[in-house]
Image: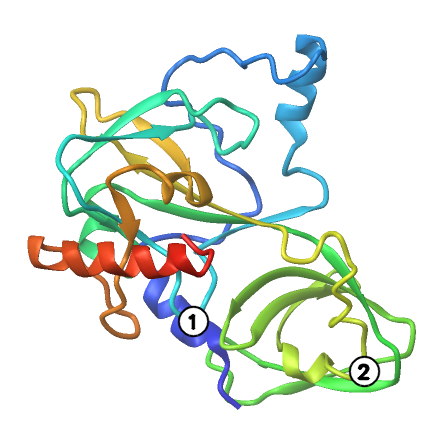
Amino acid sequence: MRYFAIALTACLAAACATTKTVSEDTATETTIEDVSSETLSEQDAKLSDYYATGWAVTGGWPGEYPAGFSILEENIVLEAHSRMHPLTPANVKCPVPQYATYQQWNIPRSQADNLNFQVATKIFNITITQDTTIEYPDNELAYRPKKLSLKTGDQLSYLRYLGEGFAIVEFEGKEYEIDEAGLHGVSDIDNSDNPDRNGEDLWLELTCADAKATRAWVLYDEVIRQDGVGPTPIIGYGESQDITQDDVQSIIEMMAINAEFGGH
């Protein structure tokens, strides 16, 4: 059996490190916008614990071909956050160079701009519906898989997706890398009614191209909708690089197709 963590580790080694804590490095001092009628102390409480309970924060964006974005035009200024937190205003002005590609396989860009890819995944429980065993790697190289015995009624906590069907789950305080296929038909993993399933925020901490080399955070779902920004083209597994002028038109055409079918 092939375990996805081998490839994931190799590709992300220079770009990001797994962490359970959220960095709170600030780019600039900001004030929290009045998002509701709550008092400032109530807002501060939400800001301090948004990802602390019910979320798993880990390094590296998920997927067989992780998402990324490229800068298509000159003089683009991203609307960034001072913290990795969706309730903070996106009021940090973060200029970025034309043709820069922010994708975790673009190692030169990751190293030059000290990129920090983090994913916050909403944890949801998976209940085992019949006795079963699932395989997980015995060690980092996954030469000798072990079997985890599960009983009806056991619950796994889903922590994050990796790619190619593999995910990280927690059972009785220990984390396991598993193939999700082993849970189909023997658990409720396919229950689409679970409100927490697919809750996922992709964050990137980057260095802005300003005189202060400001550090700021962007949320993928926000930044990909900004003018002058487009999805990074796929050039090969484990490969990514800054785009060129020749790539811009094909990216724009791809964006038009995605928009037609409701994507971005």
Q: Where 43 falls versus 179 (above or below)? A: above
The image shows residue 98 at horizontal and vertical percentages of 14, 41
Q: Crowding near pointer 2: few (<14 within 10 Å), some, many (20+)?
A: some
Q: How is the image coloured?
A: rainbow
Say which residue label 1 marks. 64
Q: What element carries label 2?
A: loop
The residue shown at (18%, 24%) is: 210
The image shows residue 11 at horizontal and vertical percentages of 33, 66
Q: Is residue 104 visible?
A: no
Q: Nearer the viewer, residue 14 or 75?
A: 75
Q: Which of 76 and 5 is in front in this view?
A: 76
State the residue lying farthest toward the front: 260
Structural distance between the alpha carbons of marks 1 and 2: 25 Å
User: Is 185 placed left or right of 162 in the picture?
Assistant: right
Q: Where 168 falls versus 101 (above or below)? A: below
Say which residue label 2 marks. 186
Location of residue 171 (image quadrant): bottom right
Q: Crowding near pointer 1: few (<14 within 10 Å), some, many (20+)?
A: some
Q: Label 1 is placed on what type of residue? A: Glu
Q: Nearer the viewer, residue 143 or 61?
A: 61
